[in-house]
Amino acid sequence: MPLFSLENNLGVWKVEESFNELYSGLENKKLYESGLSKVSSEHRRLEWIAVRRLLKEMLHFEASIAYYENGAPYLPDMPYHISISHTKGYVAVFLHEEKTVGVDIERYSDRVLRLARKFIDFEKEYISEEKKTIHLLLHWSAKESLYKILGEKEVVFKTQLSVKPFEPLQFGWFRIEAQTGKCRSVFQVNYKVENDFVLTSIEA
């Protein structure tokens, strides 16, 4: 079973199967035909179907995922808010009956070192040199999670979303502030650091 973890309505699936193996685990094929027809990339089709398998594992039944005009997912006729994320080899789904949620999963990569200047402002003063890659990934991931909650098209990660100083541990929480056209607020970010990836989640 490639279900990596499932706790507090936040699930992570390690994608080790082929598309056909994942698809065969879903019974109501008609539920997915329309969505699959819009996904041409083999890689994206694999992630797309893995999300549906994970959702089935979490709900214990199959459900359709629809999307708003801004690309945010929702579950029609179901009392759950949903957030979805994927990275190389993993997908994540976060559900909540009352609160808007955001989740982001990021595979370890040194690429974040080159991109940091695009999403880090004053936070660079607090980045750990010893754990620089992980620390930066958590900053990027947290801003991605918050972006999904805000639902605004134009958000400047570098100047409108700011992470409060924290020491990166294996798991824990830290705070992030949004100062955008529609939002002036501070949110709590829960995070986990695994062998292959970092995971952040926010409830609002």
Image (cartoon, rainbow, N blue to C red):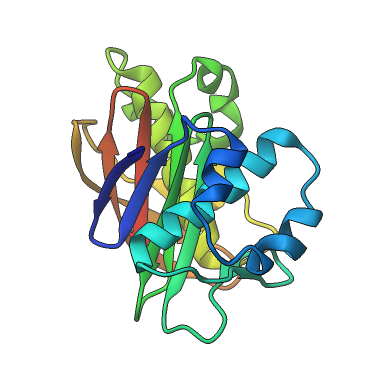
Pinpoint residue 47: horizontal percent, then vertical percent. 59, 42
Q: Which residue is pictured at 61% across the width and 40% down the height?
A: 20
In the image shown, does 196 or 4 lie closer to the viewer? 4
Q: Which residue is pictured at 76% across the width and 64% down the height?
A: 34
21 w.r.t. 189: above or below: above
Is 90 on the left-hand or right-hand side of 199?
right
Q: Which residue is pictured at 36% across the width and 58% down the height?
A: 57
166 w.r.t. 180: above or below: above
Pinpoint residue 80: horizontal percent, then vertical percent. 42, 77
120 w.r.t. 133: above or below: below
Pinpoint residue 70: horizontal percent, then vertical percent. 70, 66
In the image shown, does 144 or 9 lie closer to the viewer? 9
Pinpoint residue 46: horizontal percent, then vertical percent. 62, 40
Q: Which residue is pictured at 47% across the width and 83% down the height?
A: 78
Q: Quadrant of the N terminus?
A: top left
Is 59 on the left-hand or right-hand side of 149?
left
Count of numbered circles in the view = 0
For the question of whether residue 203 can be seen, the reply is no
For the question of whether residue 112 can be seen, the reply is yes
In which quadrant of the rendered view does residue 111 lie? top right
Q: Quadrant of the C terminus?
A: bottom left
In which quadrant of the rendered view does residue 193 lie? top left
